[in-house]
């Protein structure tokens, strides 16, 4: 479990994937989200603009990241 600290109230899913270095580019983040391989709080999330708040858990390929 990796903890990723954000400085704002929330962060959009696509931005989070880049910020946490899970995706190197916005295009890569978009592809990961649209292909259904990103889970937010245990559910598949296909919206790039999904707002993430502290304590949300993002899972990609078995790796979990907690928004702080």
Image: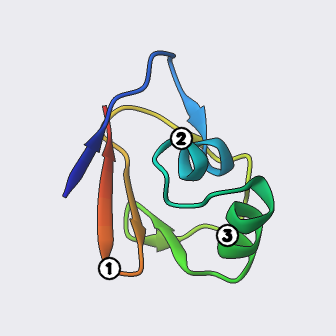
Q: Which residue is mark 2?
A: 19
Q: Around disc 1, counting alpha carbons within 10 Å, would you say few (fewer than 14), some (14 to 19), or many (20 or more)?
A: few
| Observer-nearest of 2 and 57 | 2
Q: Which residue is mark 3?
A: 33
Which residue appears at 37% of the width and 46% of the height? 56
What percent of the width, then of the height, locates residue 6?
42, 25
What percent of the width, then of the height, locates residue 3?
25, 42
Disc number at residue 31?
A: none
Residue 55 sits in quarter: top left
Mark 2, mark 1: which one is toward the viewer? 2
Disc number at residue 62?
A: 1
| Observer-nearest of 47 and 33 | 33
When the figure is inspected, residue 47 is found, relative to residue 55, above or below; the finding is: below
60 vs 14, left or right, is left
When the figure is inspected, residue 6 is found, relative to residue 51, above or below; the finding is: above
Q: Around disc 2, counting alpha carbons within 10 Å, would you say few (fewer than 14), some (14 to 19), or many (20 or more)?
A: some
Please state, as top left, top right, bottom left or bottom right, where the C terminus lies in the image: top left
Please state, as top left, top right, bottom left or bottom right, where the N terminus lies in the image: bottom left
| Observer-nearest of 58 and 27 | 27
- Label 2 close to label 1 by CB (< 8 Å): no
What percent of the width, then of the height, locates residue 53?
45, 33
Residue 33 sits in quarter: bottom right
Q: Earlier in the sequence, mark 2 or mark 1?
A: 2
Which residue appears at 36% of the width and 32% of the height? 54
Which residue appears at 53% of the width and 27% of the height? 10
Q: Secondary structure at mark 2?
A: helix
CA gap, disc 2 and disc 1: 18 Å
Name the image colouring.
rainbow
CA gap, disc 2 and disc 3: 15 Å
Which residue appears at 59% of the width and 48% of the height? 18
């Amino acid at each position: 479990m990796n903890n990723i600290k954000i400085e704002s109230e929330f962060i959009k899913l696509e931005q989070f994937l880049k910020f946490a270095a899970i995706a190197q580019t916005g295009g890569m983040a978009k592809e990961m989200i649209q292909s259904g391989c990103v889970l937010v709080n245990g559910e598949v999330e296909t919206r790039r603009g999904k707002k993430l708040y502290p304590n949300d858990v993002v899972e990609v390929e078995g790796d979990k990241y907690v928004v702080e």
